[in-house]
Amino acid sequence: MSVFRNHARRQAAKAVRSFSTSQMPRPRRQIVGAVAVGGAFLCWANPELFWGSFAVVADNVAMPLVRLLEAEAAHDCAIRAASWGLVPRDVHPDPADLEMEVWGLKFSNPLGLAAGFDKHGEAVDALLGTGFGFVEIGTVTPLPQPGNPSPRMFRLEQDRAIINRYGFNSQGLAAVRKRLEARQHRPAPRGGLVGVNVGKNKLQEDAAADYSKGLRELGPYADYLVINVSSPNTPGLRNLQKRSAMADLIKASMVARDEVVRDADGRRAAAGKSAAPLPLLIKIAPDLTAEEKQDIAEVVMETKIDGLIVSNTTVSRPASLLSPHKGQTGGLSGAPLREMSTQAIRDMYALTRGTVPIVGVGGVATGEDVLEKLKAGASLVQMYSMLVYDGPGAPPRVKKGLLQALRREHFGSARSAVGADHRGQPWAPSPTPSS
């Protein structure tokens, strides 16, 4: 079997190289050209049928072939395809029942793409076009760095999970800023919003300096900003979740964020962004004790940071894991993280008394998963790992499933489901009206 898989990987890689170069045999080029012309006509004549068919092919034909590649090579291939626009488009407008308003920003739906998929901002608009309400790029470090040696990403197919130990591989601020600048005058597909997630370089001892630099440089092109202190793959990074260190980092980051808003050269205005203060969030781990969660909640409320992302990958390994790669070092994401991250959301919502917006992430694959996290206290929800298994056509399916789940549980809208698990608590906020 391993011989077959290795041969299949080589053939798949050869096909990808052939497709991406001009060395494709002439008859094959003619066939591809005819298909492209026919597809273009169908897209013009009946875009719903075209993109619906494209999603079926992408999820059921292209994705199984791509998964014959090693995990990181497959991911790189997916990003390249997305940067060329070779991903399905969701042509249906989002219903009003899915609209969310958080930090004064309107999200057409609560489903976003988590950081880690488009680390370098290479395919933002195409990914928004697949149906996400927002896309978060990064983590971006000030200077380019390669991250940890390969192999550093592993599929746990039997568990529908991924283990990664990338270690903040990044092309650096300059490269990402150039891409974001290039798209600033183009309207975002579906009105989608863009978050930017920043981190520190591996050898930088002054963490606050690196985070502040990232916020200042990329803030003009973002709708919200994230400081990532919870990746398990950068030595010592999670120490920044300790009470004193986190408080100091948030305060320094808020100063940098405020400088973006007051920037005299007008870059933020030129990027078409609001003059209101940029929302600043901090991303935390699921592997926290009750005391650590309490400390973080108190710091978050004292500093008045705008929000939390809950959660990053876990270093724990559930006993239920079956896949051969289950012992690999790194952060575990995907289906095994779902319940742990949802409980962390529930805990942080309760500890902050529902006063701090939460972006929930971890193991999201269905509309029911999204609703579960909304009820636990998330205002927005992200997915990433499950795209590896369900393909780029997943967002419309998840949104459809969310609408069905909302109706089954008699919620008038996604807004009214936020924090539902906590209703009846004396501190619980009143439900947000459906309209």
Image (tube, rainbow, N blue to C red):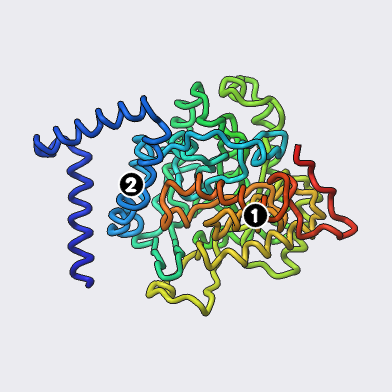
The answer to whether 309 is drawn above or below residue 254 in the figure is below
- Quadrant containing the N terminus is bottom left
Rendering coords of residue 413 (x, y %): 70, 44
Q: CA distance from mark 2 to mark 1?
A: 28 Å
Q: Residue at x 50, y 30 (%)?
A: 189
Q: Is residue 146 left or right of residue 2?
A: right
Which circle marks residue 371 in the picture? 1
Left/right placement of residue 179 relative to residue 231 reads left
Answer left or right for 325 relative to 36.
right
| Picture residue at 45% right of the left edge, 53% below the top | 387
Quick one: quadrant of the C terminus? top right
Which dot marks residue 119?
none
Tell me residue 309's x, y (percent).
64, 52
Q: Amino acid at mark 2?
A: Val
Residue 207 in sight from this viewpoint:
no
- Badge 1 amino acid: Leu
Residue 130 makes an appearance in the image: yes
Outermost residue toward the right?
A: 426
Circle 1 SS class: helix
Residue bearing the label numbered 2? 57
> Which residue appears at 86% of the width and 59% of the height?
424
